[in-house]
Image (cartoon, helix red, strand yellow):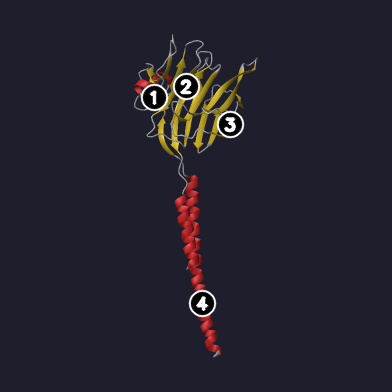
Amino acid sequence: MNSEMEKLYCEKKIKFNSKGRRNMVKKIVLLVVLAAFALCVSGTSAAVVFEDNFNSYDTSGYPLDLGVVGADKWYTPTAKPAGSVSHEILVGGWNGGRVQVQNSYWGENVDLTAYAKLPSAMANCTVTVVALAFPGYENAATYYIVARATETSFVKLAAVDGGIVDEETEARALYVRLTDSDGGASGDIYLGVWEKASVISMSLTVNGNMATASVTNGSSTLTFSGATTVLDAGYAGFGAISEWNYAEGFFDNFVVSDIPEPATMFLMAVGLAVVRFRKK
């Protein structure tokens, strides 16, 4: 009798261990899949929805108005200050595949913005561009990118000329500024001594109520974040401000990327699967 009971116990134990091993294998496989998926999501780059390196426009050498030759891709300013000699956003082979923001009307403080014609208005996105000072016209200049832009609202990242920091070498400071149309502002944050021969790389990400900015010039890099109350979807663009001078500047490699949505549904499905395995 004892021998039969021991035999039955062993058979049940073997079955239990076999079932336990199968469940354990399932859970391990599930965890491996989940880990692989999480790794893929973390490494997934945002999807590019708009880009322009300004190399595809007329290369004849004649300055071309971006709002005319790039009308299928860009909205550009149409209003000009009274008496303005030149208040334009120009492209063409003459400037080496870059776009030039130009205002040569003395004393006019004007925003010059080019807005990308996105497939649809976007709330969450990343906007990047590189800017380069126009030699001799960088004083009091501001170069910027904008996101969630409409006729009345925007989130803006700007690189701002901070004035001379060394009279002997005439070195100038470069500051960065994160603002929105609701009055939010980071203040001017010192980036470093402006290396004017180097581009200013700017990146602005808006995701929910957070705006994250990154600016690099030469050996100086600054990344910071701030809250914004401008949450509506809009358009993206770049531009410059002429503070008081003939401020001009070049822009290149403008890109707008969508932000991938979190994989909430997938994680819920994985959670349900785990529950099912535990019940079996």
Residue at the (52%, 88%) spot, across then down? 4
Helix, strand or loop under label 1: strand
> Residue tagged by mark 2?
250
- Residue 116 in view here: yes
Labels 1 and 2 touching (C-beta < 8 A): no
Residue type, mark 4 in image: Ile
Q: What is the distance, in whole Å, between disc 4 and disc 2 at their CAs?
A: 75 Å
Specify the label residue 14 is tagged with: 4
Gap between marks 1 and 2 measured at Cα:
17 Å
Of 4 and 59, nearer the camera is 4
* x then y, percent, for residue 63: 39, 16
> Would you identify the image quadrant in which residue 123 lies?
top left
Q: Marks 2 and 3, Cα distance to the nearest angstrom?
A: 20 Å
Image quadrant in which you'd find residue 71: top left
In contact (CB < 8 Å): disc 3 and disc 4: no
**Looking at the image, is 83 positioned above or below residue 71?**
above
Between the residue at mark 3 and the residue at mark 1, the CA separation in whole angstroms equals 30 Å
Q: Is residue 170 above or below residue 206?
A: above
* 1 or 4: mark nearer the eye: 1
- C-alpha distance separating marks 3 and 4: 63 Å
Task: Categorize mark 2 by other alpha carbons within 10 Å: few (<14), some (14-19), many (20+).
Answer: many
Local crowd size for mark 3, using a 10 Å CA cut-off: few (<14), some (14–19), many (≥20):
some
For disc 3, the marked residue is 221
Residue type marked 3: Thr
| Numbered label attached to residue 75 | 1
268 or 16: nearer the viewer = 268
Q: Could you tell me residue 75's position as x and y percent?
A: 39, 24
